[in-house]
Amino acid sequence: MKGISEDEYAWLENAQDPKVVKWALEQDRIARKQVRKYSDILYKRMVPFYKRPIMRSVQLTKRGIILFLSDHKSYKVQLLHKNGKRELLADSNKLGKDVVIQGVQARDDGKRLALHYSAGGSDEGTVRILDLETGHVLDTLHGFLGNILWLPDESYYLARTARKEKSPQPLPRILTEQTLRRTDQQSRRMGPDLSRR
């Protein structure tokens, strides 16, 4: 399809590939050589900043404010209730080794939360749909996933890119597909058809 090209850096995502390991070690060697003379000075200056919490996003909902933050230990998602109390919704340390929470999307009513995360910040990851009233996981999706678009009922649209698996024909391998999902079923819709819905 005209105008669509392959991701020339996708090969770097396979950390088990000897070519990727060799490339990463060489880049590390070059970088260390360049900054070695400044490392002690930079380290002392940067550590205090590195340990400070960073607010990554804030979202207002009818249940309270969804806070997505990180510090030098983990990524966290909290619900700030109207009475000022904070409730921990997710902690990257509890999701697995080297997990990075990449984003969160809550419904406006605060009843559902989409938690996007992956190992080491890879593009290929997981989205969990959480019921914030019960704490249950309603749905878990894996792959190259995009944002969630919440609909007024219990359904949502999800963008998914076919990069490793075979894409639905006759679409090119890297085209993003739009999927309408509910926790009990899904129906697939491709990009161009989405505007007609």
Image (cartoon, rainbow, N blue to C red):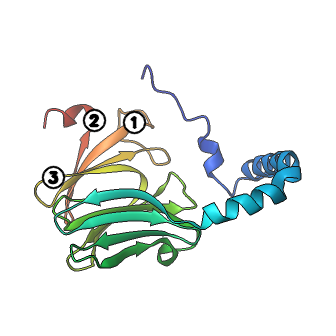
On the image, the x and y values in percent for residue 139 come to 29, 67
For residue 74, side relative to residue 137 (left or right): right
Labelled disc at residue 191? 2
Identify residue type, mark 3. Answer: Leu
Q: Residue, x 62% and y 61% (percent of image)?
A: 49
User: Which-is-in-front pick, marks 2 and 3?
Assistant: 3
Q: Secondary structure at mark 1?
A: loop
Task: State if disc 3 and disc 2 touch (CB < 8 Å).
Answer: no
**Along the polypeptide, which appears first: circle 3 or circle 1?**
3
The answer to which of 21 and 41 lies nearer the viewer is 41
Q: CA distance from mark 3 to mark 1?
A: 23 Å
The answer to which of 40 and 23 lies nearer the viewer is 40
Residue carrying label 3:
151
The answer to which of 96 and 50 lies nearer the viewer is 50
Q: Secondary structure at mark 2?
A: helix
Residue 61 picture quarter? bottom left
Looking at the rendering, in which quadrant would you find the C terminus?
A: top left
Q: Residue, x 29% and y 58% (percent of image)?
A: 59
